[in-house]
Image (tube, helix red, strand yellow):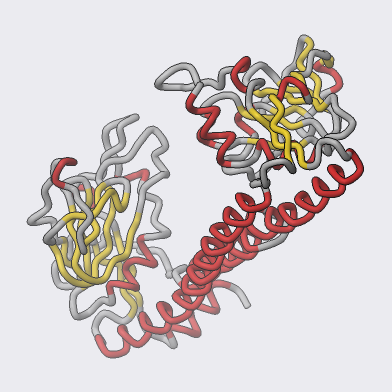
Amino acid sequence: MSKLSFIEKLLDGAEVEWKLLGNEHFFKIANQGRKPVKSSLRIIGETPYYGANNIQDYVKGFTHDGEYVLIAEDGSSSLENYSIQYTNGKFWANNHVHVVSGTSSIYTRYLYHYLDNVNFIPFLTGGNRAKLTKGQLILIPIPIPCPDNPEKSLAIQSEIVRILDSFTELTAELTAELTARKKQYNYFRNKLLTFDEGDVEWLPLSEIAHYSKTRISHDQLDNTNYVGVDNLLQNRAGKTESNHVPTSGNLTEYREGDTLIGNIRPYLKKIWQADRVGGTNGDVLVVHSIENNINPRYLYQVLADDKFFEYNMQHAKGAKMPRGNKPKIMEYKVPIPYPNDPEKSLAEQARIVNILDKFDTFTNSLQEGLPREIELREKQYKYYRDLLLNFPKPIEDVA
């Protein structure tokens, strides 16, 4: 079934008219009352405080109460990156967010779903510091099914909202499940990497590993085995293919089993264990195990721990763009279980790795596990949103 026939069936012969967001019969722009709040006055309260970056903090009191769509007024150099937020209840809005709702003729939730798919770029001003002024906001056209028959119009809007909300609710449930599982993962990670005194020896990283000193030619690299800090993913999520493969020179070589750590902004937790031979640059550290009694995957899991990234940030250099301190990183203490019994030590390392890897797959993998399910549900939502909101475009001027 084509997108158009789907819409035609849903409309059942009803006309669609496009109305500007400034049309007060259908929409309300409730910007009055917006004002900034000093950071010193933002304390934990009962109402969220919204600004251009969505929820910034919580404050006492509120400026609005009810169902609204919040649209960022200020953007960034990435013009597409405009935030849209739906809220229902009491909240505080500052002067960097537009507050919009439907009237009795328009469901605000319908308005939210449509605006969530709007290309705002044509309405922005200000160049690199993109800005959506109220004067431009009110020029955004919104499709209104059957505007002369409010009852039928609301019925059509309601059906669209019902279908799209079913996907967003499922995504929200999966996201909540993922958050709970990550807390569980962190609990078990901490528990597994905590040892009784006498069962463990803490060795500096320099005694069991070193930074790769071997080189690899650029002609042996492609987008699958070249790793730059830009294609290492945040929060231990691995890597993607590179868009910037060097075309000359020799680079740092990594080998299967090595741990690669993004050395710019350590707090981003960019880390990946190599499953192939490849190359990288000076912004990525290649940690190569030199101890036979250390499982390389166990070493990766120790370095992927929050305690390592916290240590790394404590010793990082630079304020705006901190970099890891390479000598200090080599001083990081690695727990070696049962150091006097290599066989038992390797068995314990393997047990720990087996448990943590299962959690890793479930909470971080983009190929399987909850992140994959969330990604699929989000794609499904966008597909049906495009399908349901693909109304015939206006030919004449919009009122």
Please determine whether, in this image, residue 264 is positioned above or below residue 267: above
Q: Quadrant of residue 312?
A: top right
In the rendered image, residue 108, in percent from the top left (x then y), is placed at: 28, 72
Please determine whether, in this image, residue 267 is positioned above or below residue 172: above
> Which residue is found at the position 38% from the left and 65% from the top?
114
Give whichever of 2, 320 is nearer the camera: 320
Give whichever of 23, 352 is nearer the camera: 352
> Which residue is found at the position 26% from the left and 79% from the top?
147
In the rendered image, residue 20, in percent from the top left (x then y), is placed at: 24, 61
Please determine whether, in this image, residue 352 is positioned above or below residue 155: above
Residue 96 in view here: yes
Location of the N terminus (image quadrant): bottom right
- The residue at the far top in this view is 249
State the count of labels: 0
Location of the C terminus (image quadrant): bottom left
> Which residue is found at the position 62% from the left and 58% from the top?
371
Q: Quadrant of residue 66?
A: bottom left
Please determine whether, in this image, residue 276 is positioned above or below residue 27: above
In the figure, is residue 16 to the left or right of 213?
Answer: left
Residue 138 in view here: no
> Which residue is found at the position 62% from the left and 20% from the top?
283
In the figure, is residue 319 to the left or right of 266?
Answer: left
In the rendered image, residue 42, in percent from the top left (x then y), is placed at: 18, 48
In the rendered image, residue 83, in percent from the top left (x then y), is placed at: 36, 51
- The residue at the far front in this view is 198
- The residue at the far bottom in this view is 151
In the figure, is residue 277 to the left or right of 235?
Answer: right
Give whichever of 10, 397 is nearer the camera: 10
Q: Quadrant of residue 319?
A: top left
